[in-house]
Image (cartoon, helix red, strand yellow):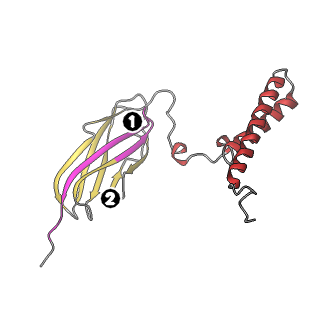
Amino acid sequence: MGAGYCISKKPIVHSYSNRIMKKLFLFTAGVALLGTLAGCGNSGLEQKLSKLERRVEMLENNGNEPASQAAPNPITAAQPEVPEGPVATFNFAETAHDFGTIQEGTVAEHVFKFTNNGEVPLIISNAQGSCGCTVPQYPKEPIAPGATGEILVSFNSQGRTGNQQKFVSLTANTNPSITRLSISSFVEKTGSAE
């Protein structure tokens, strides 16, 4: 007999998945039974119930750790927290700028001006462009309530042609904590020298 087949020439996969389903059913029934018994306040049974629940989760995840114990998702972990208490407020003169038509290779720059209309100093903790061609520069010191500030955004059009739209995400002690600025342009391909 070749490995991987039982006597009836049926793949063992069906037999394996049936065994997993039976184990999953038995563990689920055990969890339900222990859950009923744990309602009586027995801490030993509550610990057993907790262990069984983790085991069922592992079986459901094909032997992998339960999601509750897995490493945090880097995307959701990177989300900034919403500040508590009074917050600062960006008030931009404009949040979008169109450079119009520019030649490929041009480094176009624009200054976005803002006022802190909040009750507390505005602290920008990060500014990030949507790609390496878009570079923001922002004030590192707090902006007092009523004071103004500037965000300088540089766009390097080298290697980019056609319609372009890029974004800058500002993280600050505002609500929401992320504010987006956008720049756009139409980049014409430079003619080759002959």
Question: Is 145 in front, or is 125?
Answer: 125
Secondary-structure class at tag 2: loop
Quadrant location of residue 10? Answer: bottom right
Instruction: Give left or right: position of 72 versus 27.
Output: left
- Amino acid carrying mark 2 in the image: Cys
Task: Determine if the magenta segment contains residue 179.
Answer: yes
Q: Residue at x 13, y 76 (%)?
A: 193
Q: From the top left corner, tell me how far across and down residue 112 is, in percent.
A: 27, 44
Q: Residue at x 38, y 29 (%)?
A: 118
Quarter in which the N terminus is drawn: bottom right
Q: From the top left corner, tell me how far across and down residue 44 is, in percent.
A: 87, 31
Instruction: Give left or right: position of 79 versus 105.
Output: right
Task: Determine if the magenta segment contains residue 90.
Answer: no
Q: Distance between the residues labelled 2 and 1?
A: 31 Å
Disc 2 vs disc 1: which is toward the camera?
A: 2
Q: From the top left corner, tell me how far across and down residue 94 is, in percent.
A: 25, 38
Quarter in which the C terminus is drawn: bottom left
**Magenta stretch prevailing secondary structure:** strand
Q: Residue at x 28, y 56 (%)?
A: 155
Within 10 Å of disc 2 (Cα), the crowding (few <14, some 14-19, many 20+) is some
Quadrant location of residue 158? Answer: bottom left
Quadrant location of residue 148? Answer: top left
Q: Give the range drawn in magenta.
A: 168-191
**Taking the image as drawn, is residue 193 in sight?**
yes
Instruction: Give left or right: position of 74 versus 8.
Output: left
Q: Mark 1 points at which residue?
A: 144
Instruction: Give left or right: position of 50 versus 190.
Output: right
Q: Mark 2 points at which residue?
A: 133
Within 10 Å of disc 1 (Cα), the crowding (few <14, some 14-19, many 20+) is some
